[in-house]
Image: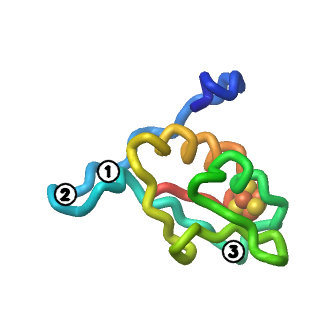
Amino acid sequence: MSARLGLGIPTAPATQARPAGAGASAATLHVDWTACAARGLCAELLSNLLELDEWGYPRALGYGSDIPVGAAELADARVAVALCPRQALSLR
Ligand code: SF4
């Protein structure tokens, strides 16, 4: 995704491969709400995965703080992790 954003941000190392049959997600994006500053950058970068609640904290569309990330969204998720100013995002 960094190429699409034109930010030139290096991506994080690949996450561990999921075992066969573990579903379509390539990784899980975790939001640490205790570290989050509720500014919403990640929700802008991952608008297909995240929305902001009424206080500005990101939450997954249909999930809690652990968000399945598909292969098509993995690069965007890595950019969001790299850009989070509070290091509140992680990929597992
Ligand atoms: S980018 Fe980080 S600090 Fe900002 S809303 Fe998302 S998780 Fe919170």
CA distance separating discs 2 and 3: 28 Å
Amino acid type indicated by mark 1: Gln
Amino acid type indicated by mark 3: Trp
CA distance separating discs 2 and 1: 9 Å
Place of residue 75 in the rendered image (x, y in percent of width and height, measured from the top left): 51, 38
Label 1 element class? loop
Q: Which residue is mark 2?
A: 19
Q: Residues within 10 Å of mark 1 (few under 14, many from 20)?
A: few
Q: Quadrant of ligand 1?
A: bottom right
Label 3 element class? loop
Q: Is residue 17 left or right of residue 34?
A: left
Q: Which residue is mark 3?
A: 33
Amino acid type indicated by mark 2: Pro
| Position above or below: 91 against 71 | below
Q: Which residue is mark 1?
A: 16
Place of residue 42 in the rendered image (x, y in percent of width and height, measured from the top left): 70, 53
The answer as to whether callout 3 falls within 8 Å of ligand 1 is yes
Place of residue 29 in the rendered image (x, y in percent of width and height, measured from the top left): 51, 60
Q: Quadrant of residue 76?
A: top right
| Position above or below: 68 against 26 | below
Q: Is residue 43 left or right of residue 92?
A: right
- Front residue of 53/79: it is 53
Residue located at (57% from left, 57% from top): 49
Quarter the N terminus occupies: top right
